[in-house]
Image: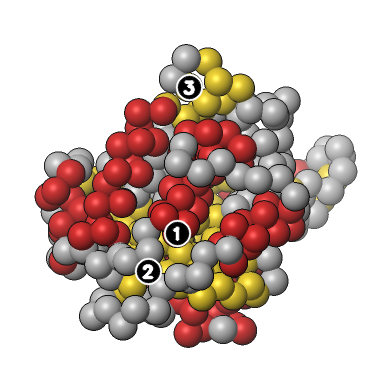
């Protein structure tokens, strides 16, 4: 079994990047992490499927959950890793092997943290939510996810990205009537009717609400269009899939109602709006003492998380959560993604300070 470096979080990150771990193929990296963690007598280690949870059990007053996913998107001619100056290139270097390396190094080396810590290494974050490893842990061993506050090591370039926006998708299907294209007046073209929906989306003015001092920017976008029968047939059905990103001052039900209200002027009898998936938002949770200490002692920039992350999972369980990790999120999933050494080390030192000293 490969030995993972210790005392060098940059080298450790490179070693983790070199372990291919596309979603559903995390077994090798999880087995290596498990061996490292089980060698630490100060940790209680549980494996649930391809998810690992390592916990200190010191009876501290508060518990911090540090979470990170072990999977990556598919490789794209970007393995093995390579180092060019201060940059580490490779699949997952940004999203999020650097965050995983920070968690592993702290789990192995900080034996007497100021707060109890749960290190949650979970699988299949980069695919549909129903496959997400956190849901598997919750179904089988929910107590392993208990905590007072959570930090996810998603790439934030060393800023604290508070909470997250929710996301939902609706499929809008417009009804029509078939006819020969030589006599279109005998039918009703469903594809043409989609134009009214697309006009509404084009003219939509997104909200930019402030929530607990963080500005969120909502969005309503068409992401897929389908329809058509044959080259000489007026189509009797056409659909558009719409994605709505909504701020944490709205519930999922409120966001769905808003989308339906916006689309209503384009709809007629026979048309349908179907909710296909919904992931809730999460409020910033900046009032928690541990989050406040992390921000203040490290003079962190605080901004809203405009995408969706698993902080929403913890928020649903009543655990305030934020995103804080190394790596530039704007280059995540790209062929040329990379991680800067200094950003990784700065982030490591900030999380280490929180674990060692608490709030």
Mark 1 neighbour density, 10 Å: few (under 14) some (14–19) many (20 or more): many
* Upstream in sequence: badge 1 or badge 2: 1
Q: Residues at badges 1 and 2 in contact (C-beta under 8 Å)?
A: yes
Measure the alpha-carbon separation of dots 3 and 1: 25 Å
Q: Residue at x 47, y 15 (%)?
A: 85
Q: Position of residue 66 (x, y in %)?
A: 41, 61
Determine crowd level at label 2: few under 14, some 14-19, many 20+ residues with C-alpha closer than 10 A: many
Q: Which residue is mark 1?
A: 107
Q: Is residue 55 above or below residue 247?
A: below
Q: Nearer the viewer, mark 1 or mark 2?
A: 1
For disc 3, the neighbor class at 10 Å (few under 14, some 14 to 19, many from 20) is some
Determine whether 148 is above or below 217 in the image: below
Name which residue lies at 20% across and 60% down: 357
What's the mark number on residue 87?
3
CB atoms at circles 3 and 1 under 8 Å apart? no
Outermost residue toward the top? 85
User: In this image, 76 relative to 260: left or right?
Assistant: right
Residue 191 coordinates in the image, percent (x, y): 67, 46
256 or 87, which lies in front?
87
Residue 179 to residue 49: above or below: above
Residue at mark 2: 117
Q: Earlier in the sequence, mark 3 or mark 2?
A: 3
| Element type where label 2 sits in the image | strand
Q: How far apart, in angstroms, are the residues tagged by discs 3 and 2?
A: 30 Å
Q: Nearer the viewer, residue 39 or 291?
A: 39
- Nearer the observer: mark 3 or 2; the answer is 2
């Amino acid at each position: 079994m490969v030995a993972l470096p210790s005392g060098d979080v940059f080298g450790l990150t490179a070693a983790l990047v070199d372990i291919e771990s596309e979603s559903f193929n995390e077994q090798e990296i999880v087995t290596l992490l498990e061996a490292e963690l089980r060698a630490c007598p100060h940790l209680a280690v549980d494996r649930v499927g391809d998810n690992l949870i390592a916990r200190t059990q010191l009876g501290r007053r508060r518990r911090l959950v540090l979470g990170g996913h072990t999977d990556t998107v598919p490789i794209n001619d970007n393995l093995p890793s390579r180092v060019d100056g201060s940059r580490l290139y490779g699949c997952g270097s940004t999203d999020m092997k650097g965050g995983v390396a920070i968690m592993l190094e702290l789990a192995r080396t900080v034996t007497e943290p100021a707060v109890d810590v749960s290190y949650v290494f979970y699988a299949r974050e980069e695919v549909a939510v129903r496959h997400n490893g956190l849901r598997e842990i919750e179904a089988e061993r929910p107590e392993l996810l208990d905590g007072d506050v959570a930090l996810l090591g998603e790439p934030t370039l060393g800023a604290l990205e508070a909470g997250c926006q929710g996301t939902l998708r609706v499929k809008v299907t417009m009804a029509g009537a078939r006819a020969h294209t030589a006599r279109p007046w005998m039918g009703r073209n469903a594809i043409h009717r989609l134009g009214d929906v697309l006009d509404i989306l084009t003219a939509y003015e997104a909200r930019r609400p402030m929530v607990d001092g963080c500005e969120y920017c909502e969005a309503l976008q068409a992401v897929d269009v389908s329809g058509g029968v044959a080259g000489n047939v007026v189509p009797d059905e056409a659909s558009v899939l719409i994605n709505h990103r909504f701020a944490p001052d709205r519930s999922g039900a409120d966001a769905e109602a808003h989308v339906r209200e916006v689309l209503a002027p384009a709809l007629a009898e026979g048309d349908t709006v179907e909710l296909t998936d919904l992931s809730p938002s999460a409020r910033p949770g900046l009032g928690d003492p541990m989050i406040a200490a992390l921000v203040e002692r490290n003079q962190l920039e605080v901004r809203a998380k405009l995408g969706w992350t698993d902080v929403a999972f913890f928020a649903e369980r009543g655990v305030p959560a934020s995103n804080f990790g190394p790596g530039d999120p704007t280059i995540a999933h790209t062929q040329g993604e990379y991680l800067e050494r200094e950003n990784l080390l700065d982030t490591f030192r900030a999380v280490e300070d929180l674990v060692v000293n608490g709030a």
